[in-house]
């Protein structure tokens, strides 16, 4: 099994953001390992800061969700920790209730999909400090989100899109997960789940009963078109500026792996068409775009990424190990 609690926060004024992930990873017959992943995105730097720590010291603290290596803790309203040269003390709150991606809720109790996900705080606002190599960054009313996923296997291929800090409506947000999963040796079309919140209205997107998602994706960005109820259509475009993407390798409990690209200061546009009316939302750096694919050799065997996608064009992050190996 694996389980992950994660957050992202982005400055409303400049392309500067942070993505912190706390995970549990357990292969059959092995003891669980915990990991802290920290990425700081700063357009002033040639590449994001990336670091990961893995440890056998893992617990669910009283009143919290997860604590790894005694150095990183995440729970309701609080995130504190350190990873490499990064230190953080953050507080967050969300005026909106959690987003359960899977509909109907029965899917949280069935074997498929093997990855379950929810957004604990879809409209989070962050306060606090982030220190990187001696430089202190003050977070004052930074928008973002806090998420939670778990399961026995990652999707064969996935995209995660999050949008905030929209110029037209600063309170609006977008949170979409798209996946292709393998059933009976075959890959499904793209399946989307999520929501768009505009002017206090939460619009459900994707789902098993929605029309097929139209997706074009690459390490440079993606374009996604989704249908929803009552003739609603949403088009999302996200781009990855040069030097702004982080590269990670995720391990599956069954021994497989995925290469993952994440840019959390991505330009993002959302086009909403409802009853013939067209509205646009745009953010110069408030988007998050994550793409997960099989590594090239493994993909050839299992039908994931195609030749020419090797490495996703980003360097993989360094990490330090204090326990069982997990990449």
Image: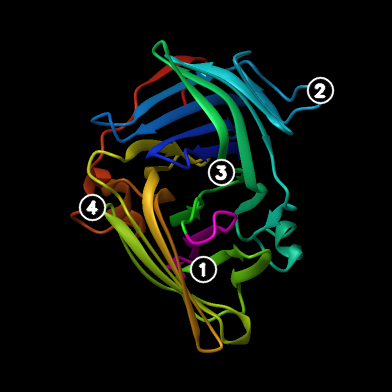
Mark nearer the N terminus (2 vs 4): 2
Q: Quadrant of the C terminus?
A: top left
Does residue 31 appear to the left or right of 316 in the view shown? right
Marks 3 and 2, how far apart at CA = 25 Å
What kind of element bears circle 2?
loop
Q: Are marks 3 and 2 in contact (CB under 8 Å)?
A: no
| Residue neighbourhood size for the residue with mark 1, other residues' Cα within 10 Å, grouped as few (<14), some (14–19), many (≥20) | many
Along the line of sight, which residue is nearer the eye, 251 or 201?
Answer: 201
| Residue neighbourhood size for the residue with mark 4, other residues' Cα within 10 Å, grouped as few (<14), some (14–19), many (≥20) | some
Q: What residue appears at the point 25 percent right and 59 percent down from the top-left corner?
A: 306
Above/below status of 236 relative to 82: below
Membership of 145 in magenta stretch: no
Q: Are marks 4 and 3 in contact (CB under 8 Å)?
A: no
Marks 4 and 3, how far apart at CA = 30 Å
| Colour scheme | rainbow
| Residue indicated by mark 4 | 309
| Residue indicated by mark 3 | 144
| Residue indicated by mark 2 | 62
Magenta residues?
Answer: 168-189
What kind of element bears circle 1?
strand
Q: Quadrant of residue 28?
A: top right
Does residue 316 appear to the left or right of 82 in the view shown? left
Mark nearer the N terminus (2 vs 1): 2
Mark nearer the N terminus (3 vs 2): 2
Marks 2 and 1, how far apart at CA = 36 Å
Q: Nearer the viewer, mark 2 or mark 1?
A: 2
Q: What residue appears at the point 63 percent right and 53 percent down from the top-left corner?
A: 116
Along the line of sight, which residue is nearer the eye, 302 or 202?
Answer: 202
């Amino acid at each position: 099994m694996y389980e992950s609690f994660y957050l992202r926060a982005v400055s409303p004024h400049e392309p500067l953001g942070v993505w912190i992930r706390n995970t549990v990873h357990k292969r059959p017959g092995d003891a669980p390992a915990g990991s802290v992943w920290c990425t700081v995105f700063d357009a002033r730097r040639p590449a994001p800061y990336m670091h990961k720590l893995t440890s056998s010291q893992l617990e669910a603290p009283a009143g919290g969700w997860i604590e790894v290596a005694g150095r990183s803790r995440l729970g309701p309203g609080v995130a504190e920790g350190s990873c490499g040269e990064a230190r953080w003390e953050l507080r967050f709150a969300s005026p909106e209730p959690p987003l359960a991606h899977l509909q109907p809720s029965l899917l949280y109790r069935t074997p498929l999909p093997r990855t379950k996900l929810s957004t604990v705080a879809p409209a989070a606002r962050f306060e606090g400090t982030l220190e990187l190599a001696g430089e202190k960054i003050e977070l004052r009313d930074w928008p973002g989100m806090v998420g939670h996923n778990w399961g026995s296997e990652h999707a064969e291929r996935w995209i995660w899109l999050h949008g905030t800090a929209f110029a037209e409506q600063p309170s609006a947000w977008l949170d979409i997960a798209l996946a292709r999963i393998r059933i009976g040796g075959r890959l499904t079309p793209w399946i989307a789940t999520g929501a768009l919140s505009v002017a206090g209205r939460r619009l459900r997107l994707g789902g098993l009963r929605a029309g097929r998602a139209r997706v074009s994706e690459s390490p440079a960005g993606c374009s996604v078109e989704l249908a929803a109820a009552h003739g609603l259509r949403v088009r999302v475009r996200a781009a990855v500026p040069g030097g702004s993407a982080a590269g990670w390798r995720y391990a599956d409990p069954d021994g497989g792996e995925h290469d993952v690209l994440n840019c959390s200061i991505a330009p993002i546009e959302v086009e909403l068409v409802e009853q013939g009316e067209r509205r646009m939302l745009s953010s110069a750096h408030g988007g998050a775009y994550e793409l997960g694919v099989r590594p090239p050799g493994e993909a050839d065997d299992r039908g994931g990424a195609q030749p020419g996608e090797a490495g996703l064009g980003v360097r993989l992050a360094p990490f330090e190990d204090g326990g069982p190996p997990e990449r």
